[in-house]
Image: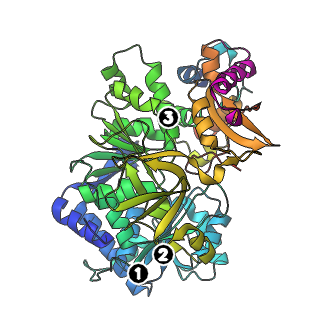
Amino acid sequence: MHSTIRELLAAAAQDFGAQDAFRYKVKGSGDGGKKEVRIEAKTYTQLKEDSECFSAVLAALGQKGKHVAIVGPTSYSWVVAYFGTADSGSVVVPLDANLPDADLCELIDRADVTTLVYDEAKAGVAQMAAQRCTKLEHILCMSEPHGIAKEQSMWELIGGQGAGFDYVPQPDQLATIMFTSGTTGKSKGVMLTHRNLAENATCLDMGLESGIVILSVLPIHHAYCLSMDILKGISIGAVICINDSLLRVAKNIKLFEPNMILMVPLMIETLAKKLEEAAWIPAPLVRAKVFGKQFHTVCSGGAYLNPAYLEMFQKYGITIWQGYGMTECSPVISTNYGDFMKDGSVGKLMPNCEAKVVDEEIWVKGSSVMQGYYNMPQETAETLADGWLKTGDLGYVDEDGYLFLTGRKKNLIITPNGENVSPEEIENKLGENRLVQEVLVRESEGVIEAEIFPDCEYAGKKKIKDIQGELQKIIDAYNQGAPLYKRVFRLKVRDTEFEKNTTKKIKRF
Amino acid sequence: MFDKLTDLITNYVEVKKEDIRPESRFMEDLGFSSFDFMSMLGEIEDELDVEVNPEEAANIRTVQEAVEYLEKISE
C-alpha cells in the first residue's frame, strides 16, 4: 500500500517502466494528405518524467504549494498536470469541463486557484478567467497558446526543464480539492490528502493483473474515474486507453480492445439494450460484437444499479463489479470484486474503512475520509463527527462485512403519520419494468407521486398504444404489494428525459 | 442526406423508414436515449468521413436539425 501519490507513481515507474501507461488517438495526415487516426502511447517512465518536469515548472513559476486548477477532457496532458501538481506539494483542483464558463470561474475563485491549466476545448473559460479571476497568476495551455493574458504553453515550459524533481510530499498533506457534483445545493470543495487518495487506490488487491487494458470513458474530474481508472490503474500497471468522446465509445472499444471499463448505471442500461437486441445470436458472438471477445469486467459506481443487469451481463460472460463511494471518501467505500460478491449488496467494505449505522444512516471512518469542505466549516461540522463521515445513505452491513443500501437520507419522504419512505426503493421497484425508462418518486401535496419517462421504443415494439394506462397498471401492481404509506397515489408521464447533472444522475429538485 | 440518416436511424430504434419525418424529435418521437444518439452520431462520422463536435451535437433535437448540421460539416 502507498501513502502518497508520488510514492504510487514512483513505484509504478519502477515496476512497469517501459510498458504503456496511456494510449490515445491522435489525428494526423497519412499518405497524400488524407486524414488519419493513429494511436500514440506513453510509457510509465515517460509519465513519471513528464510529471516531474511539470512539478519543476510550477516551482519555477513560484507556484509550489499553491492551488492549480485543471479543466478539459481526459488527456495525457491532463494526467501529467495532475501528478505534476500533487507531487510538487501543490494542491490540484480538477474542474468539470461540462460546466458553463461562468460557473467554472466561480469555482476557480472559491478554491483560491492561482494557476489554471486548460485544454484547447476550454479556451473560453481561460479567456473569461483571465479577466474575472483576480487571484490567477498563471494560465497554462495544454496545446498552442491562444494569446490570452498571463498565458504560456505547458509543453514548452516542460521542454525547458531538466528531468527529476526532488520533493517528498507528506502523507497527510493536502493533495486535492474536488468539487462535488451534488444533485442538490451548492457544490462543495472536498479536501483530500495524499494518504486519502493513495490508500483508497492501493489498499485493496482486486486481483487485477498488470497489463490489463482499461478504457476510460467517465469524466476525469470525477472522483470515481480519477481514483479507479487513473490512480488504481497506474498502481497495478494497467494500460489506460482514453476515450475521446461519448460519441465514440463503440468505435473506441473496437480500436483499443479493452478488458475492463468503468461505467455509471445509465451506460450499462443502454448497453444492456444493445446486448438484448442481438439476443437471438449465441452469447459469445453478441459479446464479441458489442464489446470484443477480450472484454470481461464492468465496474459500476456513481448510482444505484438494478441487480437484474448483473445476471444479464453474466450470460454474456461479463462480470459487473458494483461498488459504492462518495468524493468525501476518496471515493470508494465498498466494492464487489472477484470471489467477493453478494447479490443486492454494494460490496465488501474497503480494508481501510470501518462502518457503523446511526439511525439507519451509514457512517464510515478510515484513512480515506476527507479533511473537510474547503472554506465551509459549517457544512464540514454537519458531515464529520469525531472522524466519522456521515454518508447520508441509509443501509446496513451484514455479518460478512457486505454493505447494503436502502436509500438516501435527504431524499426521505416523511409521511404525515411519521412513516419514513425512501423514494429510491419505490423507484427501483417501478424501474424493473421495461416500459419505465426513468422514474422519480417524490412527495407532492401530501401524497407520493411518481413521474415517469416511458421507453417509447419498447412501447412501439410491444405495440402498447395507451402508455399512460399501461404505466398506471404497473403502479397498481406495485401498490398491491406495498404497505399503505408506501403507495404511489399519483402518476405523471413526461415526454422528455429528466435533466441530469454531468455524472448523469437525475437532478432531484 | 435525409435518406442516409433515416437508414441509420432504423438501425438504432424500431421505427419504419417512412414514418420518420424531418420534424421528428430523436428522443421524444423516435425513442432514442442520449447514449443511443451519441453512438449513432459516432457511426455517421465514419460513414460520411466527417467530424462531429460533441458540444454542437448536444443541441440537435430533430431529424431536420441533424440533416442541416451534417450538411454543414460535410461541406
Q: Which mark is residue A68?
A: 2
Asked if the stretch drawn in magenta spans residue A464, the answer is yes
The answer to whether the residue labelled 1 contacts the one labelled 3, judged by CB atoms less than 8 Å apart, is no
Identify whether A417 is placed above or below A159: above
Label 3: chain? A
Q: How many marks?
A: 3
Residue B75 appears in the figure? no
Q: What residue type is labelled 1?
A: Leu
Identify whether A34 is placed above or below A393: above
Furthest toward the right, the residue is A445
The answer to whether the residue labelled 1 contacts the one labelled 2, judged by CB atoms less than 8 Å apart, is yes
User: Which residue was labeled with disc 3?
Assistant: A306
Residues at marks 2 and 3, CA–CA distance in whole angstroms: 38 Å
Mark 3, secondary structure of its residue: loop
* Closest to the observer, A276 or A142: A276
Q: Which amino acid does label 3 sit on?
A: Asn
Q: Which amino acid does label 2 sit on?
A: Val
User: Which residues make up the magenta segment?
Assistant: A463-487
Residue A137 appears in the figure? yes
